[in-house]
Image: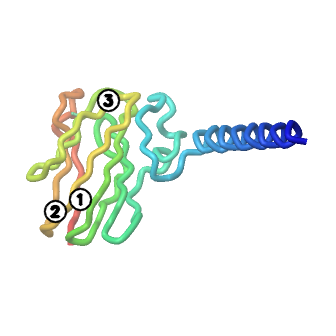
C-alpha cells in the first residue's frame, strides 16, 4: 500500500512538472503585450507585430507606448503624436533599411536604430512643447530631412 502511495505521488509530480513545462513553452510562444522584443527580421518589419502598425498607444495612467519604424528618410507613424505633459513614453523603434538615429534634443533620448534589432528607450515629458525627433546617424542623401515631432500639451 505504501508503494502505491509513492507511485501516486511520483505520477502526480510528473504531471505537475509536465504542466509547468507546457505553460512555460506556451508562455514563450505568445509573448505578453508588454514583453520587450529585441530582434526582428528587418525584411519583414511591415508584417511583424507590433511594427506592422506603428503607433502611439496609451498603456496606463500617464503611460504611453510609441512603436516606431525608422526608414530612409522618416519615421512611422507619420501622423503627429500627442501626449499630455507629465506622461512617460516607452519608445520601441526598429529600422526597415539601414542604421538610423533616434534623438530627442533636450532629453535623455538618444539611441541607435539598427535593422534587425529593436531599440528601447523611455522618457517622461514634464514640460509642454514641441519635441523634435531626429536622426543623428548619417543614413543617406536626405539624412538631414529625417525628423518628426512629438507634441506635449
Ligand atoms: Cu536616418 Cu540619418
Q: Quadrant of the C terminus?
A: bottom left
Residue 59, horizontal then vertical, whole percent: 41, 64
Disc ID at residue 64? none
Asked if the residue under mark 3 is in contact with the one under mark 1, i.e. CB atoms within 8 Å, the reply is no
Nearest to the observer: residue 111 or residue 138? 111
Residue name at image x 45 percent, y 52 percent: 34
Residue name at image x 42 percent, y 44 percent: 36
Left or right of residue 28, residue 119 in this image: left
Per the model, the C-alpha gap separating discs 3 and 2 is 26 Å
| N-terminal label among 1 and 3 | 3
Residue 50 vertical position relative to residue 7 in the rendered view, above or below: below
Mark count: 3
Q: Quadrant of the N terminus?
A: top right
Judging from the image, what secondary structure is the residue with disc 2 in?
strand
Per the model, the C-alpha gap separating discs 1 and 3 is 22 Å
Asked if the residue under mark 2 is in contact with the one under mark 1, i.e. CB atoms within 8 Å, the reply is yes
Per the model, the C-alpha gap separating discs 1 and 2 is 6 Å
Q: Which residue is mark 2?
A: 130
Q: Which residue is mark 3?
A: 114
Q: Which residue is mark 1?
A: 150
Judging from the image, what secondary structure is the residue with disc 1 in?
strand
- The mark lying in front, picked from 3 and 2, is 3
Residue 126, horizontal then vertical, whole percent: 15, 67
Label 1 packing within 10 angstroms: few (<14), some (14-19), many (20+): some
Judging from the image, what secondary structure is the residue with disc 3 in?
loop
Residue name at image x 22 percent, y 64 percent: 151
Residue 102, horizontal then vertical, whole percent: 23, 41
Amino acid at each position: 500500500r505504501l508503494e502505491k502511495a509513492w507511485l501516486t505521488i511520483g505520477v502526480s509530480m510528473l504531471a505537475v512538472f509536465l504542466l509547468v513545462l507546457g505553460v512555460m513553452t506556451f508562455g514563450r510562444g505568445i509573448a505578453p503585450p508588454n514583453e520587450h522584443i529585441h530582434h526582428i527580421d528587418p525584411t519583414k518589419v511591415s508584417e511583424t507585430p507590433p511594427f506592422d502598425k506603428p503607433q502611439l498607444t496609451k498603456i496606463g495612467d500617464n503611460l504611453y507606448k510609441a512603436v516606431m519604424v525608422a526608414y530612409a528618410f522618416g519615421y512611422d507613424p507619420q501622423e503627429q503624436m500627442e501626449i499630455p505633459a507629465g506622461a512617460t513614453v516607452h519608445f520601441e523603434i526598429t529600422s526597415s533599411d539601414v542604421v538610423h538615429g533616434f534623438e530627442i534634443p533636450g532629453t535623455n533620448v538618444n539611441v541607435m536604430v539598427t535593422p534587425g534589432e529593436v531599440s528601447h528607450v523611455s522618457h517622461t515629458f514634464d514640460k509642454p512643447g514641441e519635441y523634435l525627433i531626429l536622426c543623428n546617424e548619417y543614413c543617406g542623401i536626405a539624412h538631414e530631412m529625417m525628423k518628426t515631432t512629438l507634441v506635449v500639451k
